[in-house]
Amino acid sequence: MNTGNVSINQEQGRQFVPPVNINQAKALFRLENLTKVFRSDNVETTALNNINIEIKHGEFVAVMGPSGCGKSTLLNIIGMLDNPTSGSFWFNGEDVAAYSENKLSVIRKQNIGFIFQSFNLIDELTVRENIELALLYHKVSAADRKERAYEVMERMEIAHRANHMPAQLSGGQQQRVAVARAVIAKPHLILADEPTGNLDSHNGQEVMEMLTQLNKQGTTILMVTHSPAHAEYARRDISLFDGEVLAENLKKNRNGTGYEKNLRHVQKLSTGHAEKHQQAKNVFRFEYCRPGNRYGCIPVDRPVYPI
């Protein structure tokens, strides 16, 4: 999805799309009082509790939190792989919370691409065939699928590996294939679940740069990560703990200049939650960003929400 006028970056010789003005962008999706409860026999587990989140077209948002806090459940619902127990899920102006699996599938394949921590490539298919897989349900001819696959492989610098099998690739190369598969259908939204979790620091940084470039071209990205360094690539951080949104941390940009401290407490501290929030202090780190500080944000040992 391109936004704004396209110009040419003379130094790089690449197509460049000016960043989206987030303040003027419309909401791509919105969650209102969303709750997800898992029930089995006499056991009831609340994975998400009263979630309120809005993501606008063109945003790059990182979701952070400890294991078991509800990040994967949140991603599954936003990716339309699961339904909430209660609440609303507005996607492009439609409340899809109660939609059937078939209706969700149609919306999902037209709008959403996925990147997984474990790559999820099919071992029996070549690189090109894995990438083309995302187009099989888009009524795209075989010739067009092949052409588009080579176009995206060129962008991801893996065209020379087109006929290789996944087992012949390094971890970084496999994730490039996974990113190519996610973007070939030109989705409005990419959901990235720990996209650097199985990579070394060098390959992890390459994947983050690829996601940043896709976002600059207009694609909305929602990424789950445990890495504070990789969360810095996002414009906004959302912190989860025990299925609740604790805080959002908004940044003007990540170029060193123009950072601002803009921390918004999302949910009020309620009576009886003192122990939970005391635990949260030990999990999250507050990043204080001074306006005009060219060195960026300074991590300090404080909770990621106002006390």
Image: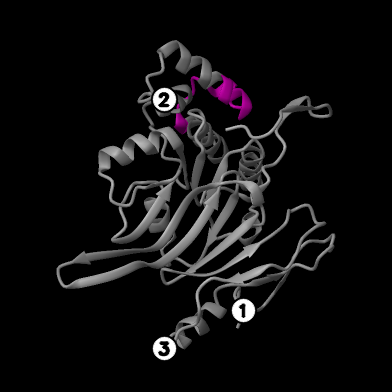
Tell me if residue 281 is in the magenta stretch. no
Is 45 displayed left or right of 149 in the figure?
left
Q: Quadrant of residue 254?
A: bottom right
What's the distance in space between the residues labelled 1 and 2, CA to CA?
45 Å
Disc 1 secondary structure class: loop
Camera-near label (1 vs 2) is: 1
Question: What residue is pinned by disc 2?
Answer: 135
Disc 3 secondary structure class: loop
Tell me if residue 164 is in the magenta stretch. yes
- The reply to whether the C-beta atoms of the residues labelled 1 and 2 are less than 8 Å apart is no
Disc 2 secondary structure class: helix
The three-letter code of the residue at mark 1 reads: Pro
Residue beneath the point at 44% across and 60% down: 71
Residue 250: image x %, image y %? 65, 61
Residue 122: image x %, image y %? 38, 32
Specify which label sits upstream in the sequence, 3 or 2. Answer: 2
Residue 179 visible in this rendered orientation of the protein: yes
- The reply to whether the C-beta atoms of the residues labelled 3 and 2 are less than 8 Å apart is no
Specify which label sits upstream in the sequence, 3 or 1. Answer: 3
- Front one among 234 and 93: 93
Question: What residue is pinned by disc 1?
Answer: 306
The three-letter code of the residue at mark 3 reads: Gly
The three-letter code of the residue at mark 2 reads: Leu
Residue beneath the point at 24% across and 71% down: 44
Residue 68 visible in this rendered orientation of the protein: no
Please provide the residue range marked out in magenta: 151-167
Within 10 angstroms of label 3, few (less than 14), some, or many (20 or more) residues? few
Disc on res. 191: none
- The reply to whether the C-beta atoms of the residues labelled 3 and 1 are less than 8 Å apart is no
Residue beneath the point at 31% across and 51% down: 82
Question: What residue is pinned by disc 3?
Answer: 272
